[in-house]
Amino acid sequence: MIAPCGMNCGTCIAFLRDKNKCHGCRVLYEGKLKTRQNCIVKNCINLQDTTSGFCYECKEFPCKRLKQLDKRYMTKYRTSFIQNLEMMNEKGINAFLENETIRWTCPGCGSTLSCHRNKCLVCNYEVKNTDKPEINI
C-alpha cells in the first residue's frame, strides 16, 4: 500500500471510503480509475531501473514531478513524500510502516486517519498538526 512516490495509500481518502474504493496504485483491479492507471510517477521509466520499486532509488531523486507533489502534499495534507522516501531508504520499510501506523491512528477512536481530511472519518475527531508526530528520520 505504499506507492513508488512515497504516498501511504492506506491514508488516502480514496482507499478509506466505502464507495468507489481505490486499492492503491500498485494493485491491478477492474474499474481502476484512469488517474491511477496513468500516474506519471508510477509509470516512470526510471522505476524499472530500481530494485526497490521506490523513487528514492532513482538517479533523479527527487525529480521535478516528485518535488511538485511533495510541495502540494506538505501544504495541503500534512505529509511529505520526499521525507517518507528518505525514511524508507534510511531506516527501512518496516520502520517507516511502524511510524505511519502511529502517525495516522486517530487518538479519538483508533481508526485510520486520512491525510486528505482534517477530521476522523469514524468519530469526527478534529485533527490538528500537533496530533501527528513528525517523521523520525
Image: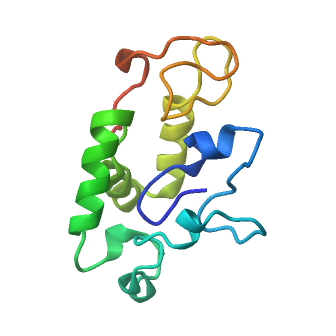
**Residue 25: quarter of image:** bottom right
- Where residue 50 appears, as percent x and y from the top left, is 41, 82
User: What residue sits 59% from the left and 68% below the top?
Assistant: 34
User: What residue sits 61% from the left and 68% below the top?
Assistant: 26
Is 66 placed above or below 41 here? above
Is 28 placed above or below 75 here? below
User: What residue sits 74% from the left and 49% below the top?
Assistant: 20
Residue 4 vs residue 75: left or right?
right
- Where residue 18 appears, as percent x and y from the top left, is 77, 39
Residue 100 vs residue 59: left or right?
right
Out of 4 and 133, give the one closest to the viewer. 4
Residue 42 vs residue 37: left or right?
left
Q: Among all residues in the image, which is located at the extreme front?
A: 34
Quarter the C terminus occupies: top left
- Where residue 5 appears, as percent x and y from the top left, is 41, 62
**Residue 30: quarter of image:** bottom right
**Residue 36: quarter of image:** bottom right
Can the viewer see residue 43 in this picture?
yes
- Where residue 35 appears, as percent x and y from the top left, is 53, 64
Q: How many marks?
A: 0
Quarter the N terminus occupies: bottom right
User: What residue sits 68% from the left and 25% below the top?
Assistant: 111
Out of 97 and 54, give the one closest to the viewer. 54
Can the viewer see residue 137 in this picture?
no
Is 82 placed above or below 63 here? above
Colour scheme: rainbow
